[in-house]
Amino acid sequence: MALYRFRVTFEDYDDVSRDIDVKSNQTFEDLHKAIHQSTGYNPEYPSSFYISNDQWMKGEEITYMPNQKRIDRKIPLMEKIKLSSFIDDPHQKFYYTFNFDRPFDFHVELMKIILDEAPGTTYPAVVRSVGEAPKQFGNVFNPAAAVADAPDEDFDFLHEMAYNPEDAEDFSEVTDTGIDDVEEKKVDDEEEEEDEFGFGDDEEFEDEDKPGRDDY
């Protein structure tokens, strides 16, 4: 029985790859599960292979755990389609999307056809593994935890009072005018204080020093 050796790479992680040998009469579902045996992912999520050209453009679809739309379109199921049915090229390519809700995209390329099985080997078989696969669901973001851990910020008056930039300009003008009024009032109070004690009129002091005035 002939074997297909596929090289499977993440579209977004060039440094992670797997080489997998699969029997020519095995199905796309066998390859699907072998890929995730090699990545450590749970394979039980809706996924699809697409027949691809050299530019990785998607063509005919072969699916797993289809939604109603794919059922209505009668998309072929992985479990029913043998790999040999779609091997037309010595370097046949398949574009593969795993888990449509939180997808990983893969490039699957036929590297060579091996004529003899290795004795005692169970297929599909992972024959080469490079790099560590990313986590299946990535790092889950928790908004509540992020807010709880955030440092206290200074109170932003304009922001908290919902001022827009135009409002901020108006507010600044009012504040400036108020400062000017306070300064003017302070000056007026000082002048009134000098007049009250008789030290604010320089002319009266000059009159007292004029010659010819009686001192008695």
Image (cartoon, rainbow, N blue to C red):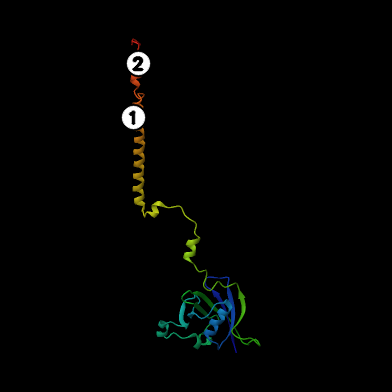
Amino acid at pointer 2: Glu
Percent across and percent down for residue 148 are 49, 61
The answer to whether residue 105 is above or below residue 70 is above
Q: Residues within 10 Å of mark 2 (few under 14, many from 20)?
A: few
The answer to whether residue 208 is above or below residue 200 is above
The numbered disc on residue 48 is none
Q: Residues within 10 Å of mark 1 (few under 14, many from 20)?
A: few
In the figure, is residue 211 to the left or right of 128? left
| Quadrant in which residue 113 is drawn | bottom right
Percent across and percent down for residue 177 are 34, 41
Which quadrant is home to the C terminus?
top left
User: Regarding mark 1 in the picture, which secondary structure is present there?
Assistant: helix
Amino acid at pointer 1: Glu
- The foreground one among 44 and 205 is 205
User: Regarding mark 2 in the picture, which secondary structure is present there?
Assistant: helix
Q: Residue at x 35, y 47 (%)?
A: 171
The answer to which of marks 2 and 1 sits earlier in the sequence is 1
Report which residue position mark 1 lands on. 192
* Res 87 seen here: no
Percent across and percent down for residue 186 are 36, 34
| Quadrant in which residue 117 is drawn | bottom right
Which quadrant is home to the N terminus?
bottom right
Report which residue position mark 2 lands on. 208
Task: State yes or no: discs 2 and 1 in contact (Cβ < 8 Å).
Answer: no
Percent across and percent down for residue 35 are 56, 79
Q: CA distance from mark 2 to mark 1?
A: 23 Å
The answer to whether residue 56 is above or below residue 202 is below
Q: Residue at x 54, y 84 (%)?
A: 30
| Quadrant in which residue 173 is drawn | top left
* Res 79 seen here: yes
- The foreground one among 93 and 127 is 127
Q: Residue furthest right?
A: 119
